[in-house]
Image (tube, grey):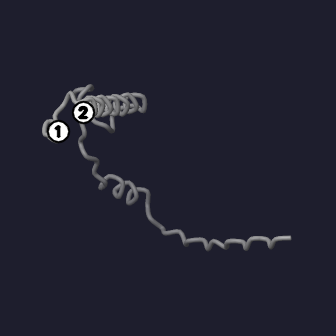
Amino acid sequence: MGKKPKRLIIKAVPATNRSIDEMQEAVDDISQPDVVSGNVPGKDITEMSFDELLIEKNASFESILSLENKFNAGEIKDNEYKEL
């Protein structure tokens, strides 16, 4: 029979004594880019719900797919396609 796999021993990392305020300051220092969706004017990506983000992702994918199909069908010239 086969050998038993060796057990992985994980060493615990000693906890640091950071206050909650220090951790909150570290989180506040992380800046998020202001990305505004074309379909939702004035709404930041951090303000959008999961469903809104999913709709935006699907709309972007469909737009790119449509553009690819037009290019492959010869409806869009190569130089126009590269500019988009």
The disc, 2 or 1, on the residue closer to the chain's N-terminal end is 2
Of helix, strand and loop, which one carries label 1?
Answer: helix
Locate the N terminus by quadrant: bottom right
**Residue appearing at x 21%, y 27% in the figure:** 75
Q: Is residue 36 left or right of residue 18?
A: left
Q: Which mark is residue 66?
A: none
How many marks are shown on the rendered structure? 2
* Distance Cα–Cα, label 2 vs label 1: 8 Å
Q: To which quarter of the image does residue 8 belong?
A: bottom right
44 to the left or right of 49:
left
Q: Relative to residue 28, is residue 34 drawn left or right? A: left
Give the position of the C terminus as an image quadrant. top left
Pointers 2 and 1 in contact (C-beta within 8 Å): yes
- Residue 71: x percent and y percent? 24, 33
Question: Residue at label 2?
Answer: 71
Q: Residues within 10 Å of mark 1 (few under 14, many from 20)?
A: few
Q: Is residue 79 left or right of residue 56?
A: left
Q: Residue at label 1?
A: 78
Foreground residue, 19 or 32? 32
The amino acid type, in three-letter code, at marker 1 is: Asp
Amino acid at the residue labelled 2? Phe
| Residue 31 x, y percent position in the rendering | 28, 51
